[in-house]
Amino acid sequence: MDLGFVSYFSENISKIAATFFTAMTPLGELRASIPLALGVYKLDIYSSIIFSIIGNMIPAVIIVYSLEPISRFLMKRFRPANKFFTWLFERTRKKYYKKFEKYSGFALTTFVGIPLPVTGAWTGSLIAFVFGIPTKKAILDIFLGVLMAATIVTIIFQTVGYVRFITG
């Protein structure tokens, strides 16, 4: 029995956990977790990407599945919440829905996939909620965007960032 993975995992558990939890943060996401894992913790590329993607997707799934029931609950019980959500949905959907409807999956995936500040799985989940994108479609689009972002961040780090860590 090959215990290579078990020994690798046990030796790197704190590094993997730090990578995983960094990817879960709304400001860090993959933009922080992959460079942290590769540059600081010296994890291999596969572990860095896999644990970053899983860590980034957990909050997205929770947000996508929970915002609708939470908003419905608040709208039924609190008048200010009802006014706010009604205003938000009407304004956003009226102003942007035609554009978004045409490119919805591509737009959400691209938005999540471009690793810039204020883009990513957290914001993509909020956008999916506001535009009423069905849950399974939203999660798929966000997941594809997270894969895209992981690829971009890894390529940038492996080409530009690695040189800075060595010479830096």
Image: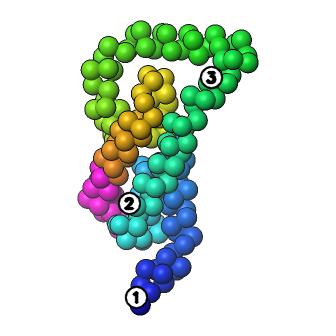
The amino acid at mark 2 is Ile
> Which disc is residue 70 wearing?
none
Q: List the residue tagged with mark 3.
A: 72
Residue 161 image offset from top left, x and y in percent: 33, 58
Q: In the drawing, does residue 117 fall left or right of residue 87?
A: left
Q: List the residue tagged with mark 1.
A: 2
Q: In the drawing, does residue 82 fall left or right of residue 31?
A: right
Q: How many marks?
A: 3
Mark 3, residues whose alpha carbon is within 10 Å: few (<14), some, or many (≥20)?
A: few
- The quadrant the C terminus occupies is bottom left
The amino acid at mark 1 is Asp
Q: What residue do we see at 41% from left, 90% from top?
A: 1
Q: Secondary structure at mark 1?
A: loop
In space, the residues marked 3 and 1 are separated at their CA atoms by 51 Å
Q: The magenta stretch spans which residues?
A: 151-168
| First along the sequence among labels 1 and 2 | 1
Q: List the residue tagged with mark 2.
A: 49
Q: Is residue 14 visible?
A: yes
Circles 3 and 1, Cβ within 8 Å, touching? The answer is no
Residue 145 image offset from top left, x and y in percent: 34, 42
| On screen, residue 166 above or below 150 | below
- Furthest residue in direction bottom, as rendered: 1
Q: Secondary structure at mark 2?
A: helix
In space, the residues marked 3 and 2 are separated at their CA atoms by 36 Å
